[in-house]
Image (spheres, rainbow, N blue to C red):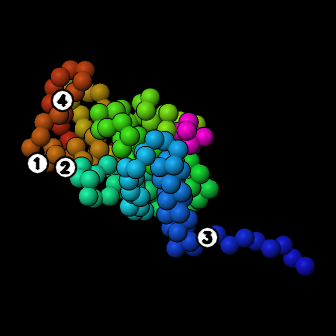
Amino acid sequence: MGCMTENPPSEAGLQARIKDAVRDWVAYAHAHLGFGRRPLPVPEVRLDLRGRGAGLAVISPRKRQPDLIRLNATLLREHPREMIEETVPHEVAHVVAYRLFGRRIKPHGREWQDVMRAFGKDPSVSHCMPAEPTRRLRRFAYRCGCESPVELTSIRHRRVQQGAVYRCRRCGERLIFSGESA
């Protein structure tokens, strides 16, 4: 009899697990963190975050609109356990901290850390899942009076083409496009 391999969870299955985890953490916070009779609505969840960030909590300015938790779908597919066990409580803790203590708290300040500890989680700020940046920027070679080579990304190169002026940090002279990609 051969080895059985576990199939990776489906996209719909992962999405359901994420929503369940968010609901569970919100219920835990409501029961254990002093909300009393005040409601703590379950945030909306979207898997639309790109780049290196694992998650982002967006606090709604209006009480009638739900808060939002944005998660990185690529990281969720590649690291489902870490995303469900670490990123979801991290982002829910942001929502809970803002709803308990108000909007003037620091994002990873004492209040957020206290909520994370109440969740039984380490209040760490960053994840250690390998993530690729959303895009790679082309670089363009520029020169100046002191002849030190300078590279500008495609964003700044386009701005130069539209009239922006950048100067060398050494000599202060205007950077001139040398006509080639770096």
Q: Is residue 179 visible?
A: no
Determine the CA span between mark 1 and mark 4: 16 Å
Image position, residue 4 (x, y; %)? 80, 73
Question: In the rendering, at what x and y percent does residue 154 appear?
Answer: 27, 49
Indicate yes or no whether the magenta region holds residue 118.
yes
User: Which is more N-terminal, label 3 or label 4?
Assistant: 3
Dot 2 crowding, Cα within 10 Å, few <14, some 14–19, many 20+:
few
The residue under label 2 is 158
Residues under numbered marks 3 and 2 in contact, where contact means CB atoms less than 8 Å apart: no
Q: Is residue 36 left or right of residue 176?
A: right
Question: Label 3, label 2: how many angstroms apart (C-alpha)?
Answer: 42 Å
- Please give left or right for residue 111 compared with residue 86 in the image: left
Q: In the rendered structure, are the residues bearing label 2 and label 1 in contact, judged by CB atoms less than 8 Å apart? A: yes
The mark closer to the camera, 3 or 1, is 3
Q: Which residues are magenta?
A: 116-121
Whichever of callouts 3 and 1 sits on the residue coming sooner in the sequence is: 3
Labels 3, 2: front one? 3
Q: CA distance from mark 2 to mark 1?
A: 6 Å
At mark 4, the secondary structure is: loop
What is the CA distance from the residue labelled 4 to the residue labelled 2? 15 Å
Q: Is residue 79 left or right of residue 156?
A: right
Q: Residue furthest right?
A: 1
User: Looking at the image, is 166 positioned above or below residue 83?
Assistant: above
Q: Which residue is mark 3?
A: 9
Return the residue at label 4. Answer: 167
Give the residue type at disc 3: Pro
The earlier-in-sequence mark between 4 and 2 is 2
Give the residue drawn at x 39%, y 47%.
95
Residue occupied by mark 1: 162
Q: Assess whether residue 25 is covered by the magenta stretch.
A: no
Q: Tell me, for residue 71, which label it has, or none.
A: none
